[in-house]
Amino acid sequence: MKREVTKPVVVKCTNCGFDNVFNQPHPYHAGFGNQGFLYNEKGNRTLVWSSFDPDYERVAGNNHPWVLGPENKKKLEAVLQPDPNGGGRWLFDNPARCLKCGNPISAPIGSNIYYLEYDGSINLDPIDNKGRGLKEMMRVEPAGGAYVSPAAGDPSAHP
């Protein structure tokens, strides 16, 4: 669902002064929305999902994304497909970046509960997008109903 807002969020880059414009009325609060989010390695797209997504919970347990420990963060990162637009992997340490110079403009989920949703981002929260879920972005091998990360030695399994 594409949201149209009359007054978008504008984040001025402290490095180059570029106005990064986001089609949202305010930075979204992941905790209030019970959502997880990650930025891609280029920092120009956002992946959003529900904290209660059953496929997310199979990987990370019954934990909200913003409080995951290092082991569960790595598990989730390992099963996610890279950004289909060529932006690289979705990682917990990736910040949002300026669209002009690439300088960080907002911290990643472990440091900031608020997120920015870039144009072309992937929102898989079923509240916003009925019938969708994180499984759409998972590169997984089913094993007894659980998700496991791709084989470490398989070069085709990793970007």
Image (cartoon, grey):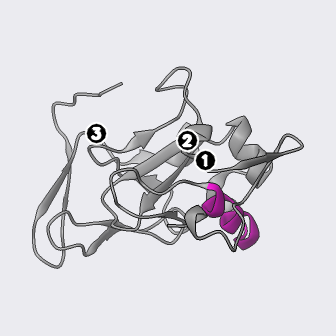
How crowded pointer 1 is (Cα within 10 Å; few <14, some 14-19, many 20+) is rated as: some
Q: In this view, does 67 lie to the left or right of 48?
A: right
Q: How far apart are marks 3 and 1 (CA)?
A: 26 Å
Provide the secondary structure element on which disc 3 rests.
loop
Q: Is residue 76 magenta?
A: yes
Q: Residues within 10 Å of mark 2 (few under 14, many from 20)?
A: many
In primary-sequence order, the first of circles 3 and 1 is 3
Q: Which of 130 and 21 is in front in this view?
A: 130
Three-letter amino acid code at the position of disc 2: Trp
At horizontal 51% and vertical 72% (from top left) the residue drawn is: 93
Asked which quadrant contains residue 76, the reply is bottom right
Give the prevailing secondary structure in the magenta stretch: helix
Q: What residue did someone put label 2 on?
A: 49
Furthest toward the right, the residue is 144
Question: Which residue is disc 3 drawn over?
Answer: 24
Image location of residue 125, percent across then percent down = 53, 33
> Does 76 sit above or below residue 158?
above
Magenta-tinted stretch: 69-79
Task: Using the rendered view, name the quadrant where residue 121 is placed.
Answer: top left
